[in-house]
Amino acid sequence: MSKHPSYGGVLMDDQGRVLLRKVTNTFGGAAWTFAKGRPDPTEHPEETAMREVLEETGYPVQVLAPIPGGFEGTTTVNRYWLMRPVGEQRAFGWETEATRWCAPEQARALIGESPSGMVRQRDLAVLQAALDVAAQEEML
């Protein structure tokens, strides 16, 4: 069975912190993770990522750079962009219980709370890839 594409973003602020979202009812085996979702029929992948980030975190964003690689979930292959917030946080949707800005080490610890080992490994890989891109973009 082939997996569906999903697109999302890793938000990073000027202090080098990343934004994680607490998933409502640990859906999909994730406690704290990054915003992502499937595209609407006519959406470009980058548009999907921006929409999903706004819906799931409340932040309007600017895309800075693609994060290389595909990161497998249970039913999707996820691709991400490194992003930064451009404006104040708005209300987020029902899929998110809370959001938290945190330093990379704290992000690793929160990701470690996910009950699914597959989700933990995926999100730790996404975090590391995002940090690598941020270092190349001289954001860190």
Image (cartoon, rainbow, N blue to C red):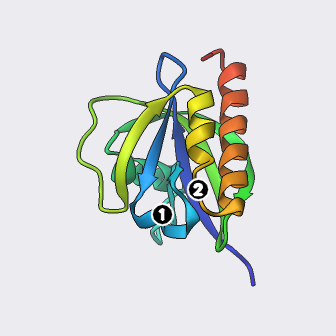
Q: Quadrant of residue 68?
A: top right
How many labels, in total?
2
- Residue 138 horizontal/vertical position (percent): 65, 15
- Residue 79 horizontal/vertical position (percent): 65, 53
Residue topped by disc 2: 114
- The residue under the point 73% across, 53% down is 121
Query: Who comes first in sequence, dot 2 or dot 1?
Result: 1
- The residue under the point 55% across, 59% down is 30
Q: Quadrant of residue 67?
A: top right
Q: Is residue 101 above or below residue 10?
A: above
Q: Is residue 49 left or right of residue 114?
A: left
- Residue 110 horizontal/vertical position (percent): 55, 42
Q: Is residue 16 left or right of residue 124?
A: left
Residue topped by disc 1: 26
Q: Are discs 2 and 1 less than 8 Å apart at CB?
A: yes
Q: Separation of disc 2 and disc 1 at Cα? A: 8 Å
Label 1 neighbour load within 10 Å: few <14, some 14-19, many 20+:
some
Residue in front for this viewpoint, 19 or 7: 19
Q: Quadrant of residue 72?
A: bottom right
Q: Give me the disc on residue 130.
A: none
Residue type, label 1: Thr
